[in-house]
Image (cartoon, grey):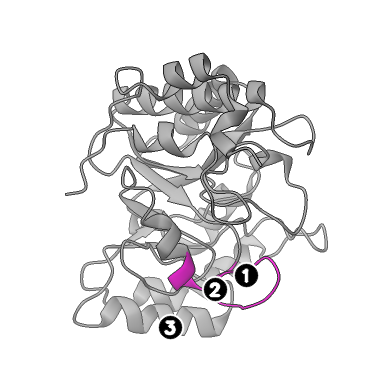
Amino acid sequence: MKSPTSLLPIAIYGILTAPGVAAKCSAGLVNIVFNGPGDKIGPGSHPDSQLFSWFSKMPAAKNWITFNEHEYEKKIPMLGDNKDAVQEAIKMVTRANPPEFLLTFNEPDWDYKTGKTKLTPQAAAELIEPLLNATAKHTKFIAPVPAFQMSNWLPEFYEKCKCRDRFYAHSVHIYNHTIDDAKTAINTFHNKYNDKPLWITEIAPRQLNCDAPTSSSWASSTEFMNELFAWGQSIEWIEKIFWNSGNKIVTHCDTNVGASYLLDGNGNPTPLLAPFNNLTCSQT
């Protein structure tokens, strides 16, 4: 059986992974997302310890995230969307050694199972109020990130909670077929929310279908990734970019991340891992 890297013609692979071609990044710019909730063991999910093992194969990345509040080395915790999660977050940010950052609600405007709003702006404002009123020692809160970034959910949330100034940075998810479209979407979002630094907490080149990636699609994703981080380095208001994803989704088709994963379903490198690791980014 051929190795994943053999999918790329040798000449193309050499060009795409050459250190001189890779983008250079400021400290903390390069980060990674892992798919599969680490708080449950079962098909398609992974314990945080396994995700950290995978993260160790990605020395270019400063931090990693997945969809739970658990803390692990180099992992940024994420707030859940219920009262118990808020209480746990309060304990986390008020203790003697709190995390530096806390991501708040992830895509509260859309429930992929029901096709309805997960949390209305009013419900989200009421739910997060105790956390925002807690005396956080050092933790910086990252604003909720909508599934539909230009919807009215976030402005309505800010209006209900009167809490916009409590967040350190805005957050956005971007999935476009081309890097030019992605840049346009990011700029459009920033033009509306330009009072804080921006974290791009999910981004990947959207695929047309769920066919197995070809040498062409791997090459296209690598070009997208290199140009994204080179561009991000040049934009002062982009603070962190989280590439989605570190691992392949094996339970279902998701064209958003179809040819962007760094490790396959068995934890083996894809043709994207080496180019990602050639992104030079300080770990300090």
Residue identified by numbered label 1: 123
Q: How many marks?
A: 3
Q: Is residue 130 above or below residue 37?
A: below
What residue appears at the point 73 percent right and 40 percent down from the top-left corner? Answer: 255
* Percent of width and height locating residue 118: 70, 64
| Residue 126 disc label | 2
**Could you tell whether 199 is left or right of 181 in the image?**
left
Residue identified by numbered label 3: 88
* Percent of width and height locating residue 106: 56, 59
* Percent of width and height locating residue 243: 48, 42
**Could you tell whether 51 is left or right of 31 in the image?**
right
Frontmost residue, 105 versus 120? 105
Residue 270 seen: yes
Q: In this view, does 200 lie above or below 84?
A: above
Residue 40 covered by magenta stretch: yes
**Could you tell whether 224 is left or right of 2 in the image?**
left
* Percent of width and height locating residue 218: 60, 28
Kind of residue sitting beneath label 2: Glu
What residue appears at the point 38 percent right and 62 percent down from the top-left corner? Answer: 76
